[in-house]
Image (spheres, rainbow, N blue to C red):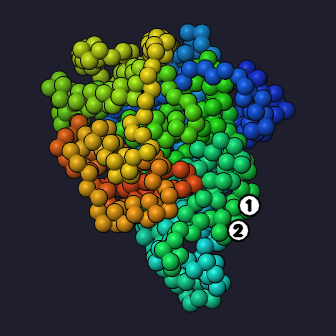
Amino acid sequence: MISDFEIANATKVRPIADVAADLGIEEKELVYYGKNVAKVPLSALSKFDKKKNGKLVLVTAITATPAGEGKTVTTIGLIQGLNRIGKKVVGALREPSLGPTFGLKGGATGGGYSQVYPMWDINLHFTGDIHAVGAAHNLLSAMVENHMAKGNELGIDPTRIVLKKAIDMDCRELRNVVVGLGGKTLGGVPHESGFLITSASEISAILALASDFDDLRRRLENIIIGYNYRGEYVKAKDLDCVGAMLILLKDAINPNLVQTLEGQPVFIHGFPFANIAHGSNSIIATKYALKMGEYAVTEAGFAADLGAEKFMDIVCRQAGFAPDCVVLVASVRALMMHGGAAAEEEMDSERLKKGFSNLDKHIDNLHSFGVPVVVAVNRFDGDTEEHLKMVENHCIEKGVEFARSDVFAEGGKGGEALAKAVVKASDKKSDFKFAYPLNITVKEKIEAIGKNIYGASMVNFLPAAEAAICDLRRAGYEDLPICIAKTQASISDDPKRKGAPTGWKLTVRELYVSAGAGFIVPICGQMMLMPGLPKTPAATRMDIDKDGNITGLR
């Protein structure tokens, strides 16, 4: 079978300057990163500020299998499909992280005939935005360590430093480490620390949520690095290094312009994980996609209980926009899994029926936000017509719009039906609402998500979470939205629970404030901020020959 790399490599794409010109961006305004990628400076985008917004389409998914259900490929295929039916469309997507690319999931640039180009660059170092965030994060960490070693005038308590180190790789061995060994002169002040993956860094969330350069500065200043001996928060601005961090991020704040295999413009900018952070591309990218197109298509990470909920309750609150339509990607194989199928030979109609509970819960959740929903039934090679029809008939019984998606095999042509359904749904009147108001307590906000979105019967707060809630209340952070960190493998906080479990208890074991990003992060279940590699990492399948031809990258 022809690989994604081979398909992309054989595609004759448009000059990126021509793609930009269609948007009204002049070639002289572009900053090139090779022949097929360009950054667009904020100064070049500001001329679009007074333009009327197009319609916003958010793509999300049911709870997926570990391999994913084709959410990104559906997003890209929808962009191509909208163009084929005559709509001016601009995409806005997140940048892949190297950790998952070399780990279990692989890249995040679509697949088959619905990809963003060039997939090999986008999946790897791209324009260096992730590296810039990692450098800024570790600069701040180094300044904290240096401050303590050189007198500690701020009285930073080494036992209560919440800022860890960052690396863009899946390294479970770095989750918990001890730093500062070797004596105060050589090693600094010994204390426990650890690493998180760069996409889990608060600076990653900040870059994606910042509206402009001044807002980026303000948010960086408010990053909480830990506590002093009096139990008060210490912030990044107290260490006088925000200016240096901004220098490292000066290019990263500018969105990256690429194209689909069929030539439609896509901004790829921002990379926060949805099971840890808010899981959306940058507000800047979405804002200008809305200004430049009749339709802007964006994507929320993982399933609708994570990325979509956070998009509604965090991103929309901070950005001031709301989706006109939500596409919910579903697949037969994922629904079978939720019905109890643990292997391919166990997939049958009865398990498919049982798995509909997961689809129904996500539909109901999305409708609770007051937005029109279209189910995209993403077809895989092994799907039978009988099972595809069962999913479609269930959507009819549920009273929700649906369309079959065959964009992996057919590109934009396979997304035309979905594009027409999206246009129809986007014309409906929406009554957008949040899952909770901001003027209630932190516990009440977490309970609103836990009970109404996840289906928990109650929420249990462990002592560490209770203490953190008291701290943030005293510091005046109680009115922030909630960004729950939990497993992506289940609507619940237990990855083994499939379908739409009820009667279970959501456990909040820790809680911290991302004051710069502007949200509170409860950590639920056994959620880790640093992923680990699987037994057979994707990296073992990758290679490159002397002519630069890559194999195994997807």
Between the residue at mark 1 and the residue at mark 2, the CA separation in whole angstroms equals: 7 Å
| Residue 40 visible in rendering | yes
Q: Identify residue type, mark 2.
A: Asp
Residue furthest right as drawn: 28
- 99 vs 305, nearest the viewer: 305
Q: Measured from the top left, where is residue 357 in percent x and y?
A: 22, 30
- 415 vs 479, nearest the viewer: 479
Above or below: residue 154 compared with residue 514: below
Disc on res. 240: 2
Query: Pointer 1: residues within 10 angstroms few (<14), some, or many (20+)?
Result: few
Query: Pointer 2: residues within 10 angstroms few (<14), some, or many (20+)?
Result: few
Q: Measured from the top left, where is residue 467 in percent x and y?
A: 37, 66
Residue named by callout 1: 243
Above or below: residue 525 compared with residue 94: below
Quadrant of the image containing the N terminus: top left
Please give left or right for residue 421 compared with residue 261 in the image.
Answer: left
Q: Measured from the top left, where is residue 445 in percent x and y?
A: 37, 46
Please give left or right for residue 204 compared with residue 444 in the image.
Answer: right
Give me the residue at 61% from left, 48% from top: 207
Q: Measured from the top left, where is residue 66 in percent x and y?
A: 34, 42
Above or below: residue 206 compared with residue 410: below
